[in-house]
Image (tube, helix red, strand yellow):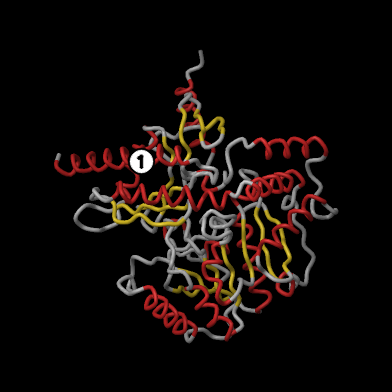
Amino acid sequence: MTDHRTDAVGLHARHRSVLPEWLTLLYDRPIELTHGEGRHVWDSDGNRYLDFFGGILTTMTAHALPEVTKAVAEQAGRIIHTSTLYLSRPMVELAERIAALSGIPDARVFFTTSGTEANDAALLLATTYRRSNQILAMRNSYHGRSFSAVGVTGNQSWSPTSLSPLQTLWVHGGVRSRGPFAHLSDAQYIEACVADLKDVLQQTSGGVAALIAEPVQGVGGFTNPPDGLYAAFREVLAEHGILWISDEVQTGWGRTGDHFWGWQAHAASGPPDLLTFAKGIGNGMSIGGVVARAEVMNCLGANSISTFGGSPVTMAAGLANLTYLLEHDLQGNARRVGGLLIERLRAVAAGLDIVREVRGRGLMIGIELVEPGTGEPSPRAAAAVTEAARERGLLIGKGGLNGAALRIAPPLSLTVAEAEEGAGLLDDALRAAQKRLAETATG
């Protein structure tokens, strides 16, 4: 019989010998996931896990969703690749549906293969349209790992270089419960952030191209401002002709429950000029893209293609996945089950010294951990809880400015029973980690 644990250890050694050392792996003993079904996955040792991270919010509907796997297999049996040099019916059909859902008037859609590439394309469009390399970005933000996307990432843990083709100006507002405005009411908070934005714009020379912002900061630990902040920002931006890019890579497709897109929590001043998407739409297949009004999308003066963006196979997957999501009202499920899960986790956290805050909306929930008695973010507590959860059969993620936040984002088809099960497992993991850290401190 094959020793799968030995296989996993050997695979880890091989991984380290040929892949970059900065390629992040979860857990002290990394696991190899071999298959999944619904909201569960299995590793190469045969262990079964309830998946509360969904491939970093990418497995949006469910693992091995029959409708998606069938669409992929059928399209692969016809033709796998053509490129954008040829007409593609699946690409046109998915673009039509996304354009209609985006809320952007006279929308055009350009497909990429990832969220990083989508944000890179949006930055290219905005800077070209505005003839400026100045970008407003939010503190604690994350927009990808390309050279340009790193330049507008405000989270030091994910920003390996200060070199950038962009001049980035940092704005307050993405983190409600920390920072100089945390003590204010929501209305006062928005007012202070708008004043900060106006002050930042006085420091610029020439026209700023765009503001890029995640409605809910993903890698930043699932933090978000009060509803309406970006609507207030947009009023100021519009006075200067500055574009608004809404990074919906993690918030799109109904994950927040209350809205289909994250920007809709800030809709009083209208939709964004550009919207980027990825992750969940492919349910694991590699899809990203940009939606923009035609005037902005068509501003490029040179030829371009997308070799793998808009692939017939990935487009077929996206169409099947989007159809399933809409027909089964997974946005509504995220709102209902996510609301129950958040309340359950807040009840769990009430008696724990290492939990500072449970935040989020829908099935996008963050738990910020701290050193007991200090309120200081605790990356070691987050690491301990993540390990303890895995030991109990629950997969979760980490994030935050200091890596001290737990990220919980199950597939949107999560059931009430699975939410209760996951909350119970996380309760045990949090208590075990708190006890372990206390023993370490006194021992």
Amino acid beneath label 1:
Leu
Q: How crowded is mark 1: few (under 14 residues within 10 Å), some or many (20 or more)?
A: many
Q: Where is residue 332 in the image (x, y as percent from the top left)?
A: 55, 52
For residue 57, side relative to residue 443 (left or right):
right
For this rendering, which residue is in front, 284 or 155?
284
Q: Is residue 93 above or below residue 130?
A: above
Give me the residue at 46% from left, 36% from top: 50
Q: Position of residue 272 (x, y in %)?
A: 61, 71
For residue 331, side relative to residue 93 (left or right):
left
Q: Where is residue 240 in the image (x, y as percent from the top left)?
A: 58, 85
Give me the residue at 52% from left, 37% from top: 39
Q: What element carries label 1?
A: helix
Q: Residue furthest top?
A: 1
For this rendering, which residue is in front, 230 or 6?
230
For residue 207, side relative to residue 169 (left or right):
right
Q: Residue furthest left?
A: 442
Give me the residue at 42% from left, 83% from top: 195
Give me the residue at 36% from left, 56% from top: 402
Say how many tags the image has.
1
Q: Position of residue 26 (x, y in %)?
A: 43, 41
Which quadrant, please, contains the C terminus? top left
Q: In this view, does 136 lie above or below 429?
A: below
Residue indicated by mark 1: 426
